[in-house]
Image (cartoon, rainbow, N blue to C red):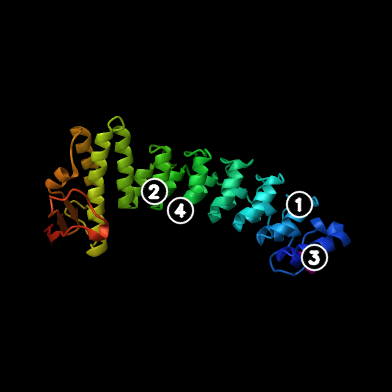
Amino acid sequence: MASSAWFQAALKNNVDSIHLLLKAHPTWINEGDQSNFVSKKKGWTALHYAAASNSTDVASLLIHNRACLDTKNAKGLSPLMLAARKNQPEVAALLIEAKANPNLEQNGDTALFQAAHKNSKEVALLLTNGRAKIDYQNQDGSTALLNAASRNHKQVLAVLINAGASLDIQNNLGETALIRAASQNFRDIATLLIQAGSSLDIKNKAGETALMCAKRQQHVAMIYLLEMAQMLKVLGESRESCRVAQMEVEASMAALGFVLENFHCDLHRKDRKGMTSLMLAANMVQQMWCRCCSRRQHRISLKNLIHHRRKLLLGEWVLVWRQPHLTHFPAKCNLPIYKMRKAGLH
């Protein structure tokens, strides 16, 4: 049985000790750790330790001496999976170059799932350039793309999109990556998916699209984003119309963000029709898009849009634009001065 000195040398990247021990005990190269050298490391080979600790010199020596690349430890993890989980791209590159199998599973999850779970961008890039199955689905029906979207891991998501991952694969609940992003209010993730061409019309098993999920959970900014995507799709043949529509929604989003951050509005208060401020905001956006769609003017400046004073009904407050001469919107923290007054809903 391999001694603890063997595994400790692999863990600490002590290539000289590994070389000497390997000459004296060549069979140790593929033996798993059955000792208590490190807790919860049962079944780890020297290559597992090298992969987890980024011991590139030891890993290179072990690979050169034909160590088994796909041995799994007691938890079902191969060295490549460990490298992905620990975000060790150097060792991962050595293993992939040596033809380690990237599609081995641990409870249905491959090395690419591990990279997506831990947001290991470099490892994900290596795997997608190798032989990894990008659209492989685990026992829950999830793909690596769904995994990355569910955890708001933008970097890995971008790598998977660029590698040609399918955007609209559904898991066992019928959810796509966009539906998951909308449900969890991950706007950056949703933006990446929409820009890449993810479908806005797919429904989960509950019969909800991404927009319906956002409305049910009252994710206002996500509602704006998805409404914008829907209408930009309709107005796709007119770039100027798209630009005007986008400016109107961005103006409303800026005002909404200002009020929510600075006036602590009661978002649960309802008017006589049972509508909360978030519901009103969602309806207002939809009406705004309809106006843009029907108007189809090709020469409208933001100055003219602001000139027609926009009002945002938010709970008990009405927001009125006070500077119609502005030609652009600054950052949220530097918004123009607003006049606030009671709306008198009752």
Q: CA distance from mark 2 to mark 4?
A: 11 Å
Q: Residue furthest right?
A: 24
Residue 264, horizontal then vertical, whole percent: 24, 64
Q: Name the amino acid, label 3.
A: Ser
Q: Earlier in the sequence, mark 3 or mark 1?
A: 3
Q: Is residue 249 visible?
A: yes
Query: To which quarter of the image does residue 206 belong?
Result: top left
Q: Name the amino acid, label 2.
A: Ala
Determine the secondary structure under disc 2.
helix
Q: Nearer the viewer, residue 189 or 325?
A: 325
Q: Earlier in the sequence, mark 2 or mark 4?
A: 4
* Position of residue 327 in the picture relative to residue 30 (left or right): left
Neighbour tally class for label 3: few under 14, some 14-19, many 20 plus, Cα within 10 Å: some
Name the residue carrying label 3: 17
Q: Name the amino acid, label 1.
A: Ile
Q: Earlier in the sequence, mark 3 or mark 4?
A: 3
Q: Which residues are magenta?
A: 1-7
Q: Is residue 267 visible?
A: no
Question: Is the Cβ of the residue at disc 2 closer than 8 Å to that at disc 4?
Answer: no
Instruction: Name the front one of labels 2 and 3.
Output: 3
Q: Earlier in the sequence, mark 4 or mark 1?
A: 1
Instruction: Name the front one of labels 3 and 4.
Output: 3
What is the number of the mark on residue 63? 1
Name the residue carrying label 2: 182
Residue 91, horizontal then vertical, whole percent: 66, 54
Q: Which quadrant is the C terminus positioned in?
A: bottom left
Q: Earlier in the sequence, mark 1 or mark 2?
A: 1
Q: CA distance from mark 3 to mark 1?
A: 16 Å
* Position of residue 164 in the picture relative to residue 49 (left or right): left
Question: Is the Cβ of the residue at disc 4 closer than 8 Å to that at disc 1?
Answer: no
Neighbour tally class for label 2: few under 14, some 14-19, many 20 plus, Cα within 10 Å: many
Neighbour tally class for label 1: few under 14, some 14-19, many 20 plus, Cα within 10 Å: some
